[in-house]
Amino acid sequence: MMIVVMKSQAKMGNVSAVIARIEDAGFRVHLSEGDERTIIGVIGDGRPLDRDQLERMPGVERCVPILEPFKLASKNFNPSGTSFPIGDHEVGKKEVLIIAGPCSVESRSQIIETAHAVKEAGAHVLRGGAFKPRTSPYSFQGLGEEGLEYLADAREETGLPIITEVMEPALVPLVCQYADVLQIGARNMQNYALLHAVGKAQHPVMLKRGMSSLMKEWLMCAEYILSHGNTRVMLCERGIRTFESYTRNTFDINAIPVIKELSHLPIIADPSHATGKWEYVAAAAKASIAAGADGLIIEVHPQPDIALSDGVQSLKPKRFAQLVSELKAIAEAVGRELRAQPG
Ligand code: PEP
Ligand code: MN
């Protein structure tokens, strides 16, 4: 696997000649046209490609082999960074994306009320689980398709795009019918059948980091999705398991700058699962934006004490609104933008 960096003054014809040469040799091409120069990613199945021959072609500056085990997820593959629209917002550019909503969809009225509240507070995307990965089989497992319908109703009422978790390959087509973004949960990060299925679905995906996963393993999982040509992938740091037990997880803030260096994919932080206590969510959210996160996913519930899941880490709408206004200043201080006005 390698990338071909074209000279800044390379002509269109030079680029197409290089692409033709690569395709004739049986490889696929991934084109990234930056403001400065064009970069051509060469995707193969491990067969060698004659690098010297490519380097001698007109308009080619150099060929760079990608040495990391992750190729399509590697920063070299798209040095200017990947961005894509979610509703009216573009994730992966200057704007900070705010995703908020309850852990689980519990009823039609609960999700609609929360959707209005988070929109009013400045959120851009509504979250809510319909299929829930619960530690205990006796805990609330989610409303399933009924929950997806209520999410769609909430989108209809507020205009907010929705993100929701999909847990099994067979349900990918169903969840795609409702969701604007598919969430792959921490427990399913290495569910390779599911990664293949969401890759094939060509639907935007947010891939959460497994609770005991190396960043390298996480990026290899993104690679599975990308290998199907699905480029709308964002990563989500949601805390990892350590020996510390006062908080639910240990928020690995390091992941934000490390992923930014290793990969071109947008990185979202989840301060709710990363801390597990609502009291710490604001601090972790602010730190995430300061560290360069492209967005946040935050659990918000109108009545956390009676939430069917993750109430202890859920913010009430009022606190969430306060937090968003504080985040705006932090975003601006680090050269980002937070559009907190509804619409
Ligand atoms: C969730 O987002 O509610 C969730 C289950 O998160 P995670 O997969 O990170 O535990
Ligand atoms: Mn949750």
Image (tube, rainbow, N blue to C red):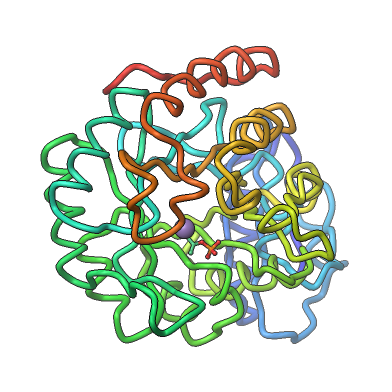
The quadrant of the picture occupied by the N terminus is: bottom right
Determine whether, in the image, residue 82 is placed left or right of residue 301: right
Q: Is residue 268 visible?
A: no
Q: Residue at x 69, y 58 (%)?
A: 249
Measuring from the top left, give residue 301's x and y in whole percent: 35, 43
Q: Nearer the viewer, residue 202 or 242?
A: 242
At which x and y percent is residue 100? 40, 41
Q: Eyeballing the image, is 245 above or below 123?
A: below
Q: Can the viewer see residue 328 in this picture?
A: yes
Of 211 and 315, nearer the camera is: 315
Q: Position of residue 22 (x, y in %)?
A: 65, 70
**How many marks can you see?**
0
Quadrant in which the C terminus is drawn? top left
Q: Residue furthest front?
A: 305
**Image quadrant in which you'd find residue 36:** top right
Q: Is residue 290 above or below residue 12?
A: above
Give residue 308's position: percent from left, percent from top.
Answer: 34, 60
Residue depicted at x 29% and y 66%: 130
**Residue 336 falls in which quadrant of the image?**
top right
Residue at left offset 36%, top offset 33%: 124
The answer to whether 24 appears left or right of 320 in the picture is right
In this rendering, position of residue 259 left or right of residue 206: right
Residue 266 vs residue 3, the one in the foreground:
266
In this orientation, which residue lies closer to the viewer: 216 or 49?
A: 216
| Residue occupying the point 33% across, 72% down | 140
